[in-house]
Image: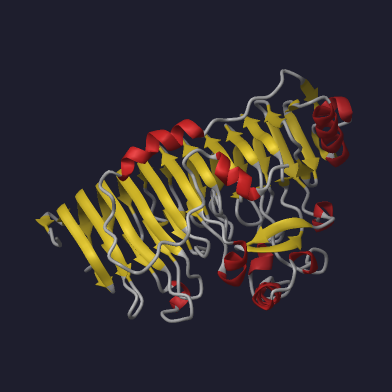
Amino acid sequence: MKSRRSFLAAAAGAVLAPQPAGRAEAAPDLDGWARVPGIRRRIRPPRFPRRTFPVTRHGAVGDGTAMCTDAFRQAIAACAAAGGGRVLVPAGTYLTGAIHLADNVELHLEAGATIRFSRDPADYLPVVHTRYEGVELMNYSPFVYAYERENVAITGSGTIDGRADATHWWDWSGDPPPSERPDKNLLAAMAEQGVPVAERVFGAGHYLRPNLIQLYRCRNVLIEGVTVKDSPMWNIHPVLCTNVTIREVTVDSPNGPNNDGCDPESCVDVLIERCEFNTGDDCVAIKAGKNADGRRVNAPSMNVLVDSCVMRDGNGGVTIGSETTGGVRWVYAWNCTMSSPRLERAIRVKTNPDRGGYVRDVYFRDITVGQAADAVIEVALNYENKDTGPYFPDVGAIDVRRLRAGRAPRAFNLIGNPGNPIRGVRVADSVFEEMAEDDVVRGVTGLVLREVWINGRRVDSGG
């Protein structure tokens, strides 16, 4: 297995980028879109040998009640031992615990197939190396998981059902016991103290929720066609991966806490296209590790493309953060439609002076927003109401073109830190039709509005 550094170096033109030096003004590069064709050419889905391993041949029964964990394990092992191929899930409902993918394995769900995950936390043990909200630890296995694998895929037209609800998994997010809060505090303290990851052991007796799908330190990843729903928390979470394609996926998980749709974290060369998100948190959230642990790992997210997606319910349509510590750069989103009474923001960058890191060279164009429940565009460096701290984030060089918004409380919510402004936001050729309240703009330098209309009035400004 290649190292993480070799993964990044292998992406042509995608060199490891240090945090941009200094705090000078940084207007967005008006030719930044010229990078997209090169990034797009590098992102290529993996291919698999034409061998098929039905899980039913290994004892799986699609009646929704028989446990099929061993059948999935055996089918994946047989496929990998043969040199790779397709592990086939036929029509039916298959109850299982954790599924761990191997090199050169495509997990394919036929039409009418549902993978239905157990609600027993013991079915996600032993613990594995994972990330919880940007911090590494040993915890319950994500439901579909791959660690340090090459050429892995989840495809088909079936459904991956996490089966979380108010009495299973989601109840851990609240304050009454069982609650994740003490464990979150413990994990954060371990990271700050530099406790080795192997000694940050949670799992049984603890309450940190696993993700539905997590690919960790993988190369050449494809998720295509499937519907995913009702995760304990984040639905699709590639971490420290290179060459990731997520295509024509539906995330239908609007009611769960922290039910983000797709969260590429510390990844390079990612394509998210023609997907539909209806989520209980951010639809797409690009992340890069958190606080002390993010500084230790020090791996950015770079070259992320979001093309022709639909965002419905969610805290944000396309979001960066709040975990920004390793840095986020060269993000592009275009031809996306966002609208719902429960979509809080369309475009959002969120971080604070505990997170640090940078967010630079972020580009949006041809975005249609029907309605939003808060600001259409938010860049806030005071996430969780933290204005000051030891690690001010460096945020700027953000470019928005040809955005049309129908109805929302306000067009802009732009909030820098005292003495640490947002540096360089450009909005051009955009219309905000029915904004009910005044914009909030403070702690921003280099704000440029060109051919921008709010409530029928042109509001151009800046150099």
The count of marks equals 0
Q: Residue at x 70, y 75 (%)?
A: 190
Q: Residue at x 24, y 69 (%)?
A: 445
**Percent of width and height locating residue 454:** 17, 57
- Left or right of residue 277, residue 69 in this image: right
- Left or right of residue 29, residue 244 in this image: right
**Residue 36 visible in the snapshot:** yes
**Percent of width and height locating residue 83:** 79, 26
The extreme top residue here reads: 50
**Percent of width and height locating residue 356:** 48, 70
Closer to us: 189 or 12:
12
Q: Residue at x 66, y 34 (%)?
A: 153
**Residue 345 visible in the snapshot:** no
**Percent of width and height locating residue 448:** 19, 59
Closer to us: 221 or 340:
221
Q: Residue at x 76, y 37 (%)?
A: 102
**Which quarter shows the N terminus?**
top right
The extreme left residue here reads: 457
Q: Quadrant of residue 136?
A: bottom right
User: From what the image shows, is residue 275 above or below residue 432?
Assistant: above
- Left or right of residue 128, residue 405 in this image: left
Task: Please name the colour scheme applied to the rendered image.
Answer: secondary structure
Q: Quadrant of residue 59?
A: top right
**Which quarter shows the C terminus?**
bottom left
Closer to us: 65 or 151:
151
- Left or right of residue 341, residue 400 in this image: left
User: From what the image shows, is residue 226 above or below residue 212?
Assistant: above
